[in-house]
Amino acid sequence: MTTLEEQYKNDPDFNDWQKKKRRGQVMTGIFVIIAGLVYMFKQMGYLIPDWFFTWPTILIALGIIALVKNNFRSATGLILILIGSLFIASYAFPEFTIIHYKIPIILFIIGIILIFKPKNKCRDYGKFGYQKHRFDHKNYSGGGKGEYSDMVENSNEDYIFVNNVFAGTEKNIFSKDFKGGEIKNTFSGCKLNLMQAEIVTEAVLTIKQQFGGVKLVIPPNWVIKSDIECVFAGVEDKRQLLNVNDAAQKKTLILTGHIFMSGIEIVSY
């Protein structure tokens, strides 16, 4: 009888689920160790703020775990951090008058997120109960629902420009001379499918992102050069790379820009 791991070992979605689960476990362990060390220092007489052992600190820790687990693309994690931070500020800085309005501020921001958050498709995935938006190859032709947007758009543009605020964008790029473009995300997500695109020599894609996620579907023979500045963020190339020795066949995609509390995922199909 095969195990669940053997049954799905070649499925990229199952592997992603395992990685997410492992990241969550590691972050939880790290926070437990930190809490133990801080409590030990407190017992030894070191000056530890009283608010460190309050429930808002737990909310912040849970929010950070959710962000790391989901590649910094978790609205739940952001909300937990926001709520925890506002209540901790009321403990640490009671003289700040804005803190007295923390609950209306929290409700206002949560309401904005709920209004502008892209609709998600809930699909049960396999026996292990993993819900994920799997890439639908039918969406290559456009017109279907996508992972970050209700509509997948086809484009023949050589330059692409995306600007999202509490929204999502998905594009299939068919340009035969793709030169790059710019992506701006704020509390948003974007997916670019470049499997049908071609680069003559190189292209430059600038990504400016705060609290969001970008997924790039790129041919395995493209070379990625990342010059992105990351703050509490990461760029992960999950492709099985091909060894391209012929300079005439080498296609280079240069990533520039800066991302904060975000993630960039590079895959290939």
Image (cartoon, rainbow, N blue to C red):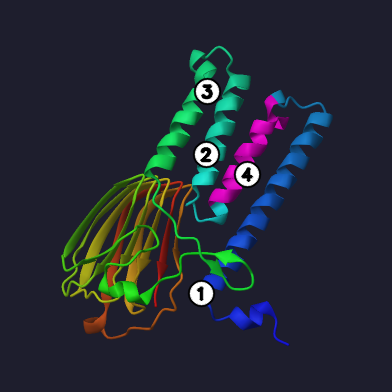
Residue 202 versus residue 234 in the image, above or below: below
CB-based contact (under 8 Å), mark 1 and mark 2? no
Question: Which is more N-terminal, label 4 or label 2?
Answer: 4
The reply to whether the magenta stretch includes residue 245 is no
Residue 175 point in image, percent of width and height: 18, 71
Provide the residue designation for mark 2: 79
Who comes first in sequence, dot 1 or dot 2?
1
Q: List x then y, in percent, for residue 22.
A: 64, 62
Q: Residue 12 carries which label?
A: 1
Question: In the rendered view of the protein, which quadrant contains the C terminus?
Answer: bottom left
Badge 1: few (under 14), some or many (20 or more) residues near its Cα, within 10 Å? some
Q: Which amino acid does label 1 sit on?
A: Pro
Q: How far apart are marks 3 and 1 (CA)?
A: 42 Å
Disc 3 element: helix
Which residue: 40% across, 45% down?
Answer: 187
**In this view, the mark in front (3 or 4):** 3
Label 4, label 1: how far apart the Cα atoms are: 26 Å
**Residue range of the region highlighted in magenta in the rendering:** 51-67
| Badge 3: residue crowd in 10 Å (few <14, some 14–19, many ≥20) | some
The amino acid at mark 4 is: Leu
Q: Residue at the location (31% across, 53% down)?
A: 207
Q: Which of marks 3 and 2 is nearer the N terminus?
A: 2
Q: Indicate the amino acid at tag 2.
A: Ile
Q: Quadrant of the N terminus?
A: bottom right
Q: Which of marks 4 and 1 is nearer the N terminus?
A: 1
- Helix, strand or loop for the magenta stretch, by majority: helix
Q: Which mark is drawn over residue 102?
A: 3
Q: Name the residue under label 4.
A: 62
